[in-house]
Image: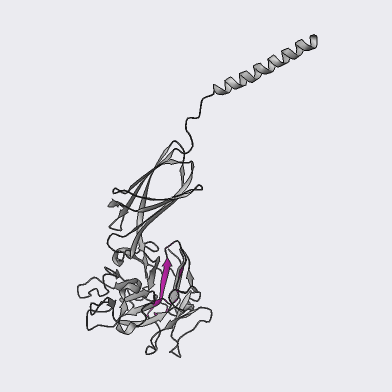
Amino acid sequence: MLRSNKLKYFITLLISILSFNLFSGCAENPPIFVDGQGMLDLVVLWDSTYTDSTNAIPVSNAKVIISSKYAAKICETDQNGKLCLSNLPTSVYGYTVRKTHPIDPNIILVGSKQNVEIVSGKVVYDTIYVKPISSTGISINEIYSAGPVNNFFFFFDQFIELYNASDSVKYLDGMMIMRFSSNSEGKGPGADEDDDGDIDGATYVFKFPGKPGETNFPIYPKQFVVLASDAVDHRNVCPTSYDLSKADWEFYNQYSPEDIDNPNVPNLINMRPDKTADFLIGLTGDVVILSDGRDSIWQDGIDISTVIDGVEYQSNPHPQNKKTLDARIDRSYVLSPPRYSGKSMQRKEPGLDTNDSLSDFEILDRATPGYYK
């Protein structure tokens, strides 16, 4: 009897404890927010003057790729450049914006931001300023033509620097780098002389080995590639010059028995047997063109549709120094530094290419082969 009473007491106590835990648990406050309720209010702007953000205008119908550890989603801004997203789970997000330039199809407006934390139940307000770059990703980033500080007319340390501003690997196979300085009797170097869709006046035509479309010579995302006239340490001749012995490529003229050839640097190939001199560009004025190489018949002009980038530079803005490079490639020109100054012309930001060189470039007191100041 005593054992039976103890058993009943134990069962009653157990039921009481379970009941207390059950009801006390139900009495706890429910969570205020349910995950999956984060919000993003994004505005995409760009400055059409390419100088600062004071004249920023909305970028309508721009593609926005937003991603997190959960998934990636492709969206589009509205007519006011806005994108509003809801029901986002708590996570760290990144977003990228792309849109073709409204006037120039060879330019793309690009912007991105990473490591943005979005928390369920809260709204993140954010703004992205897009910048224009070449749609191919590759651009002529720096031109050093003036020669170093000296009084004995030394200028053989010239170089041209390329840059891949895209997020993907590109290939240089078959591309051509050219100087346009002839055709002085007509519209001028780099002009579409016969209005037939090509530019005329090629003086020097060098190409990367291989054919367009091959994949032997990569240029990686955010990589600088230096093309040296002569890939040597020019400081051995002129102390104020530059060491280009580790350049990525060298302009080597196989038709010249006197041209320097650094065996440790791959060669760009001369396409003109009638040109037996070094690849050199004008100290204070010239036209430099990079093409994809599909049109290699330079004698009748280079098809504009194959031009990847082109830069014209001149020493001063006087009216008699008329612009000659076709405006579809470059709408203006760089005001170049003085000869024998050691200064170079570099894009204000790597890959910033609006096809308006006057706005895109700045003058550096010292050249920066292979890197950004």
Above or below, 204 against 329 in this view is: below
> Which of the pair 320/60 is nearer the observer?
60
> Which of the pair 267/319 is nearer the observer?
267
Q: Is residue 165 magenta?
A: yes
Q: Is residue 199 magenta?
A: no
Locate the C terminus by quadrant: bottom left
Query: Looking at this rendering, what residue extends furthest in the left direction?
Result: 319
- Give the percent coordinates (x, y) of residue 111: 38, 55
Q: Is residue 165 left or right of residue 318?
A: right
Image quadrant where residue 191 sits: bottom left
User: Does the image show residue 241?
Assistant: no
Magenta span: 150-176
Q: Is residue 69 left or right of residue 329?
A: right
> Which of the pair 362/238 is nearer the observer?
362
- Give the percent coordinates (x, y) of residue 68: 48, 48
> Which of the pair 15/224 is nearer the observer?
15
Image quadrant where residue 130 sits: bottom left
- Give the percent coordinates (x, y) of residue 39: 41, 40
Above or below, 354 against 144 in this view is: above
Please identify the dominant SS of the magenta region: loop
Q: Is residue 152 left or right of residue 195?
A: right
Above or below, 120 against 319 in this view is: above
User: Does the image show residue 87?
Assistant: yes
Locate the N terminus by quadrant: top right
Above or below, 8 against 195 in this view is: above
Q: Residue at x 28, y 59 (%)?
A: 102
